[in-house]
Image (cartoon, coloured by chain):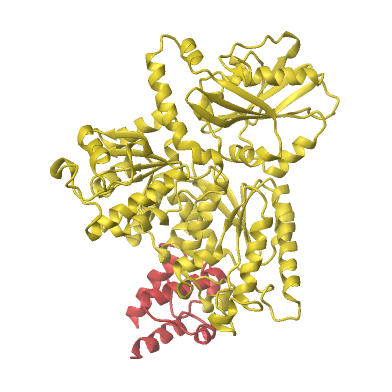
Amino acid sequence: MDDIIGRLQNVFRDVFDSEDLVIGLQTTAADVEGWDSINHVNLVLAVEREFKVRLSSSAIARLKNVGDLVTLLGTAARKP
Amino acid sequence: MNAAESLARFKKLRAAGEIASALDSLQQDLRRGVFDADTLDQAGRLLIRHSESFPPEPRALSVLLAGQFTTSWLVGALTAVAWGRGKATLVREGGYDNVIQDLAAVASPVDVVVLAPWTQRFLGRDDRPAERRIEDELSFLRRAWELTARAGAALVQIGYDWERPGPLGYCLSGLAGGRVDAVRELNEQVRRELPKGAYFVDLELVAGEVGRAAFYDARSYHWTKQPFSRVGVARLCEHLWAGVRAVTTGPKKVLVLDLDNTLWGGVVGEVGAMGVELGETADGEAFCAFQREIAGLAERGIVLAVCSKNNPADAREVFEKNPQMILKMADFAAFEATWDPKPEVIGRIARSLRLGLDSFVFFDDSPAEREHVLQSLPDVEVVDVPGDPAGYVGALQAGLWFEAVGVTQADRMRKEQYRQEEQRRELEQGSVSVQSYLESLQMVADVRLLDEPDMDRAVQLLGKTNQFNLTTRRHTAEIVRSMLAAPRSVALTLRLADRFGDAGLVSLVLAMPPGEANSTILRIDTWLMSCRVIGRTVEDYLLNQLVERARTLDYRSLQGEYIPTAKNQLVADLYDRLGFARGADRPDGGREYVLDLSRYVARPSSIKPVNSS
C-alpha cells in the first residue's frame, strides 16, 4: 500500500509538474492544481504506464479519490 | 540520456532559476530524439508552461489547431516536435468541433492554421446520399479555408481516414457504397479544391505508415473524443510539423552525405575503389538501394553534397571507376573530401552554395560525427542513422525533411543550376574584374507582367525566399490575384538566362498605389529574388523596368519598405544602394523609402533584354 502511494506520488508530481505535491488517500481532483479533464486522462495514462496495467473505463469512472485508485491498483496487481 | 533523465535535468536547472538553459537543454534532447511517444507530450507541456521565457528572437511561430476532434493532446506533442526541429512555436487550439466560430474570431496573428476534420458527421448514420455527404464536408472546409485566408494564415489541411473498414469488411468496403471508398472519394475532392500553397496531411497514408491498429485508440475516442493513440499523436505531429515547415520556411534543400559506410560499405582508403561493398551482398544491396533513393531526391531538386573524411583522390576514384555506383560526381553540387572537422566543412559548403545552414540535413553513419554536428551547428538537422544499412532509406524518409507543397520545374532544374553556379564561380575567379565577369556571362532577362501560368512559381517564391526579400510577406495565390485585380497595380516577373543555362523565373515585384487608385505614388509591397542570382545586377535591371512601367502609368514616385527578419540582412541597404531616399523608421522595426521618378536615371546593368542582340 505504501509502495503504491509512493509510486503514485511520483506520477502525480510528473503529470502536474509540481515537485512538492503531496497526496494522501483522501486527495481528490479539487485538491490538486491543474487536475482538469485533460490532465485526468494524462494521469490515468501515466498510472497505467507506471503500473503496467490497463484500467477499464467503468472502474476509472467510479474513482472518487486517491484511496480508490490505490485500492484499484492493488486489485489489478493481484490479478494473474 | 533517456527521457526521464532529460526531464530531471530540466527541473533541476529550472529549480536553480536557470530557465533559459533548462529550455535549451530540453531542445537539444528533443533534437537528439530522446523523447518517445509516451514522453513527448510531457516535454511539450513543460515548454508550453514556460512559453513566456521563450527567447524573443527569432519570434516564435504561431500555430492554431482547429479540429472536429479534441486536439488538446496534439498541442503538447506538436510543440515538442517543433522545438526538436529547431523552431520555437506557440501552438493554440480552438474549441472542440468549433472550427468555423474559432476561425472567424481569430484576433491575434496566426502564422499557420492546422485544420483537423473528423468523420463523425461524414460517416454518421443518417439518410443523406453519398454525394450530399461529400458536399456537406466540402462546404464546411471551403468556409474554413476562406476564414483562414482572411486571417492571413497559411494552411495545413489534415485529410480523412476510414479507421476501420466497417460492416462491409476489407473486400467490399473499397467498392461503391463502402466506407473506404467514400473516404477516398472525399480526400480526392479535398485535394482537388485545396487552396494553392496549402499542405495536405494525407491521414490515410499516415495511419497506414504507423498501422491503424497502433495509430488509433478507440478507448481514447470514447473518453475524450481524441481518436489517436500516443504513438499516433506523436507520428501525426511529425507530419503536421513537416506541413507547417513546408508552408512557412519551405522544405530542406540540401542533403549532406558521408561516404564510407554511408554510400558504400567499408573504408575506401583501406579497401580501394573496387573493394568497397556495393551490390552482391545483402549490405551491398542496401547501400545501392540508399543510393537509388538519393538519386531520386536529386532528380526532384534536392541539392546533394559530400562531406567525408578521406583523401580526395580516393573518394573520387570510387565515383569514377566503380561500375556499381549509382550516384555520379555530377550529382553533387559540393564535394568535400578532407580531414577538416565536419561542422567547419558544412559551414564552407553552405557558403559556397549560398544557402542557410537551416536548409541542411546531415546523414552520416558515425555517431561521433553526428554528435559533433548536433552540438556545433544548431540549425543543421541530423538524421538518426541506424546501424544496419538496410534501415538507411527508412531513416531518411522518416524525418520528412523534404516535404513540400509542390514540385515545380524550377526544383527539378536546381541541380543543374547549382553546377552552373560552380562553373560561374570558377570563371569569376579567373576574371579580371566583376564588370568583365558579368559581361562574360552574357546574361539576358525576360521581364513580364505576372500572369496565371506563372502563379505557382510566384507563390512558391513568396513562400520560401528568405534572403533577398524586402518584406517577407508570404502571400497566397488568392492575395496575389486580388493585387493583380487592383487598378494600376504592377506585378513583374523576371527570368534570367546566361551562357551556362537558364535560371528560370528568379525575381518578382508586386506594387500598387496605396489608398486612392489615382495616387501618384506606387508602393512596392513585395520585392524578392532567388539567392542564386545575387550579385548579377538583376535588381538594377528590374528596377529600371519597374520605373519605366510606373512612368507609363503616370506615377511620380516609388515607395519602398524594408522589414528586417533574421535572414534578410542582405537587402537591409538595398534601397539605399539603388538611390532611394531614406524615410522614417517605423515603430515596428520597418523602414520607409521613397524614389522620385522625375530624377531617376536608369541604372547600369550587365543584363540585356531577351531577343535583343
Please state, as top left, top right, bottom left or bottom right, where the N terminus of chain B lies in the image: bottom left
Q: Is residue B224 above or below residue B31?
A: below
Of A29 and B309, the residue lying toward us: B309
x, y percent for residue A70: 41, 83
In front here: B181 or A70? B181
Residue B358 screen position, x and y as percent: 44, 40
Question: Residue B180 at x, y = what percent?
Answer: 59, 74
Q: Colour of chain A?
A: red
Can residue B311 be seen?
no
Query: What is the number of callouts on the image?
Result: 0
- Say which of B50 and B447 sits in front: B447
The residue depicted at 45 percent of the width and 34 percent of the height is B416
Q: Quadrant of the C terminus of chain B?
A: top right
- Which lettered chain is shown in yellow? B
Give above or below for B555 relative to B502: above
As drawn, B245 above or below B166 = above
| Horizontal relation, residue B324 to residue B577: left or right | left
Q: Residue at x 55, y 50 (%)?
A: B244
